[in-house]
Amino acid sequence: MKVLVAHNRYRSNVPSGENRVVDTEMAALASAGVGIVPYLRSSDEIDAMTLAQRLAVPMQPLHSRRSVAEVEAMIERHRPDLVHLHNPFPLISLSVVRAAHRHGLPLVQTVHNHRHSCMRGSYFRDGHPCHECRGRTLPWPAVKHGCYRDSHAQSVPMAAAFLVHRGDQRAVDRYIALTDALAASLVDSGLVTADRVTIRPNSVPDPGPFRAPGTGLIFVGRLTDEKGVPLLLEAWRRSGGPFGTLTVVGEGPGRGLVEAAGRAGGDVRVLGSLEHDEVGAALDRAAALVVPSTSP
């Protein structure tokens, strides 16, 4: 079996669990004897673009002529059995659904967040849950709130892309959802019936033999409200830090809040962004990983 995997990688200066999941899955499939044909674009490409090309990037979610042409060329060259799409934004676009079907190939999409219906991908904005766009063909509230990249201007073409590609979203042959909540979100959005959604959690490589736990707690992730960073810091403050040190690994707009907690003497340590192996070592030193996310 041969699979063409299409994914728009997030910027390298913003550590992405989604990028890591895609890499891990491709490696696992390859080790099982599945032929992998990777079509990987990256948002890092934007920095090397000309001014005219950068100005056109917000329109790429509507239709990426380059990505469609490249995917079709790879289909003709490698003859895969199916296309597996992960993140299509902003450089690939959902037009690849039609490209796959034109060649008689089924297309499966793994949804790693709620961006099938929510521009932010989290059903969370301004410090609280938000479901104003769920089920809408035209997500106008997201434009009003400037949800895509915190920009009203960039939210306009993204809303148009949601409208234009509603049929493509419904034409996806099967969705893979990481959680029950994501599966329910797909169904509630009116995109698909439950029988076309498979729930499959992320996988991780075997960590090896059991090792005795370390000390303290650790958080690993983007430092944002929806990841529960303010909630975690408040809970830590109220508890008096009975578990030793709280180690925070990651970057994001909430870094200042974490650093302030450390300066306040709450035994909070900020490591910032780390390489994958360094994250593993930090996890080994902790007693437990804490996941305070406030967004499903």
Image (cartoon, rainbow, N blue to C red):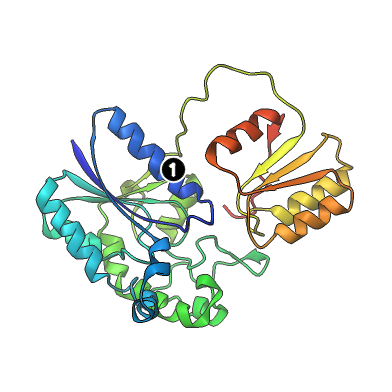
Tell me the SS state at disc 1.
Answer: helix
Residue of label 1: 21
Residue 230 image position (x, y, % from top left): 74, 56
Q: Relative to residue 270, is residue 129 depicted above or below?
A: below
Occupied quadrant, residue 172: bottom left
Occupied quadrant, residue 198: top left
Q: In the image, 266: left or right of 248?
A: right
Question: For the residue carrying disc 1, how many other residues have a C-alpha within 10 Å: few (<14), some (14-19), or many (20+)?
Answer: some
Q: Which part of the image, by quadrant, shows the N terminus? A: top left
Q: Single out the residue that lies furthest toward the top.
A: 209
Residue 291 image position (x, y, % from top left): 65, 43
Amino acid type, label 1: Val
Residue name at image x 37 percent, y 38 percent: 25
Residue name at image x 80 percent, y 38 percent: 245
Residue name at image x 46 percent, y 78 percent: 154
Q: In the image, 170: left or right of 229?
A: left
Residue 72 image position (x, y, % from top left): 15, 58
- Residue 241 visible in the picture: yes
Relative to the observer, which residue lies in front, 156 or 79? 79
Residue name at image x 22 percent, y 70 percent: 65
Residue 121 image position (x, y, % from top left): 50, 61
Q: In the image, 260: left or right of 92?
A: right
